[in-house]
């Protein structure tokens, strides 16, 4: 059953990662610069695939029953596999596909700091610090950490709706006993 959980999580993690990468590329190519709208689209896809993937595991591998804990575990694993795939894309995007995008990010941050009324000297120091820690590699690592964290939070909520326990041994035995008593009457 653990192999099934791993297989299911890898499959749905890959599906989620590929869909998010395609959507991200499309939004980039279309010039959609609305970060909050992009985030809503990506997180909606993420949540839907987490739900569907965990429910699929329950219905196809776990005989229609899954505990809250295993449901959370399924979602976290899906998130982890998805985040690794997306992190690879993030790394390749900022390293090879569009390395100039990092400079655009730095320019946007510089403009925001300027609009807050910071002095030129403080802005230069802040931007130099940001440049040290904002590399394709750190962004990829941050992607793994953040998506796995968000996936854990979403999985804790999704598991409430996906968990499904079977009848307990006592309930089944009570029903059998009731059936026997009815036959004896």
Image: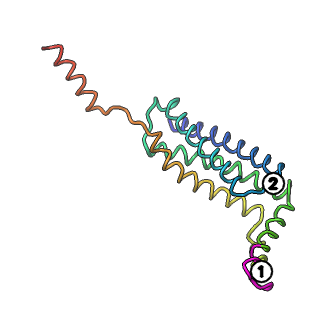
Image quarter (top left, top right, bottom left or bottom right) of the C terminus: top left
Q: Is residue 119 magenta?
A: yes
Q: Image point 86% across, 53% down: which residue?
A: 97
Q: Nearer the viewer, residue 29 or 76?
A: 29
168 shown above or below 71: above
In three-dimensional space, the C-alpha distance between marks 1 and 2, rounded to whole angstroms, equals: 27 Å
46 shown above or below 105: above
Name the disc covering residue 153, or none. none
Q: Position of residue 7 (x, y in %)?
A: 60, 37
Q: Nearer the viewer, residue 143 or 121?
A: 121
Q: Image point 75% across, 73% down: which residue?
A: 112
- Main secondary structure found in the magenta portion: helix
Res 136 → quadrant: bottom right
Q: Is residue 121 left or right of residue 177?
A: right
Residue lying furthest left in this view?
185
Q: Position of residue 128 (x, y in %)?
A: 79, 77
Label 2's element?
Answer: helix
Q: What residue is shown with label 2?
A: 93
Q: Nearer the viewer, residue 105 or 16?
A: 105
Res 67 → quadrant: top left
99 shown above or below 18: below
Pointer 1 with pointer 2, Cβ within 8 A: no
Q: Position of residue 69 (x, y in %)?
A: 45, 46
Say few, some or many: other residues with alpha carbon within 10 Å of mark 1 (under 14 / 14 to 19 / 20 or more). Answer: some
Q: What residue is shown with label 1?
A: 123
Label 1's element?
Answer: helix
The magenta stretch is: 112-123
Q: Image point 84% across, 49% down: which residue?
A: 29
Say few, some or many: other residues with alpha carbon within 10 Å of mark 2 (under 14 / 14 to 19 / 20 or more). Answer: some
Nearer the observer, disc 1 or disc 2? 1
Q: Is residue 24 left or right of residue 76?
A: right
Q: Is residue 179 magenta?
A: no
């Amino acid at each position: 059953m653990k192999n099934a959980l791993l297989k299911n999580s890898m499959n749905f993690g890959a599906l989620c990662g590929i869909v998010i990468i395609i959507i991200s590329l499309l939004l980039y190519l279309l010039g959609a610069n609305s970060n909050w709208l992009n985030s809503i689209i990506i997180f909606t896809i993420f949540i839907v695939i987490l739900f569907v993937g965990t429910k699929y595991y329950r219905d196809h591998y776990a005989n229609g029953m899954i505990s809250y804990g295993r449901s959370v575990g399924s979602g976290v694993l899906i998130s982890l596999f998805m985040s690794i795939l997306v992190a690879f894309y993030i790394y390749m995007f900022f390293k090879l596909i569009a390395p100039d995008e990092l400079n655009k990010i730095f320019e946007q941050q510089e403009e925001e700091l300027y609009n807050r009324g910071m002095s030129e000297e403080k802005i230069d120091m802040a931007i130099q610090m940001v440049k040290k820690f904002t590399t394709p590699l750190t962004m990829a690592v941050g992607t793994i950490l953040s998506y796995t964290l968000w996936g854990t939070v979403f999985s804790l909520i999704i598991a409430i709706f996906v968990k499904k326990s079977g009848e307990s041994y006592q309930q089944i035995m009570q029903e059998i006993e009731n059936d026997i008593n009815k036959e004896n009457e």
